[in-house]
Image (cartoon, rainbow, N blue to C red):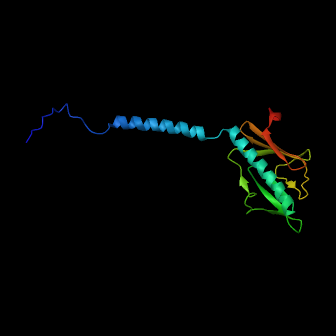
């Protein structure tokens, strides 16, 4: 049978990777993942915009629910979160804890409701904004703040809501 050629000890090739090669590859992967995570984290401006637009849609849903259900629906906030209310047969406000859309929500960390007005009069955070079953409502303003980013929601007499950056505070 054929004899294998003899290899010298220095000519032998090791299979696999060295520890240094593995550490360098893991370092590169870690840097790439870190950059990807930074890109997915929303800025203060993006967070305020997203929540402002969501709240505007919820206000319009509350308006629609009041009209179709024939009962007043209200919204209130403690500054860090908010919930919706309905007026029962005894003329008492009851929270809507299990409504599919108008359920209580916490605002993202650092985002707060900082100002409100109803019918052009300043209101305390915590007071209710009411959506009437007639569809005719008092105009209102809600201001959200995260960091230096402010977002203003304005509801008109028909319950239409606009959400936009609050330029008045700059």
Q: Quadrant of the N terminus?
A: top left
Residue lying at the far front in this picture: please name it: 1
Task: Tell me which corner region of the image, top left, top right, bottom left or bottom right, holds residue 13.
Answer: top left
Quadrant of the snapshot with the C terminus: top right
**Which residue occupies 91% across, 57% down?**
134
* In this picture, residue 140 sits left or right of residue 106: right
Considering depth in this image, is 28 or 157 the residue closer to the camera?
A: 157
Up/down of 119 relative to 97, above or below: above
Q: Is residue 4 left or right of residue 106?
A: left
Q: Position of residue 65 (x, y in %)?
A: 82, 59
Please give the name of the residue rendered at 52% of the width and 38% of the height, measured from the top-left corner: 34
| Above or below, comparing residue 168 to residue 139 in the picture | above
Q: Nearer the viewer, residue 5 or 121?
A: 5
Considering depth in this image, is 118 or 67 the residue closer to the camera? Answer: 67
Residue 26 at x, y percent in the picture: 42, 38
Residue found 66% across the figure and 38% down from its top: 43
Q: Is residue 77 visible?
A: no
In the rendered structure, the answer to whether residue 154 lies left or right of residue 32 reads right
Where does the image place residue 129, in percent across and percent down from the top left?
A: 85, 52
Vertical comparison of 59 with 12: above or below: below
Vertical placement of residue 20 versus 110, above or below: above
């Amino acid at each position: 049978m054929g004899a294998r050629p003899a290899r010298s000890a220095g000519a032998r090739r090791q299979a696999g990777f060295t520890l240094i090669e593995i550490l360098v590859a893991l370092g590169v992967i870690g840097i790439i993942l870190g950059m990807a995570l930074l890109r997915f984290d929303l800025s203060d401006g993006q967070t305020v915009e997203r929540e402002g637009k969501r709240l505007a849609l919820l206000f319009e849903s509350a308006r629609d629910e009041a009209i179709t259900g024939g009962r007043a629906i209200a919204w209130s906030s403690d500054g860090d979160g908010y919930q919706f209310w309905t007026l029962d047969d005894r003329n008492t406000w009851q929270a809507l804890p299990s409504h599919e859309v108008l359920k209580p929500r916490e605002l993202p960390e650092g985002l707060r409701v900082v100002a409100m007005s109803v019918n052009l009069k300043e209101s305390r955070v915590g007071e209710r904004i009411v959506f009437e079953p007639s569809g005719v409502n008092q105009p209102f303003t809600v201001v959200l703040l995260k960091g230096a980013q402010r977002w203003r929601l304005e509801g008109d007499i028909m319950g239409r809501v606009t959400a936009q950056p609050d330029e008045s505070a700059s």
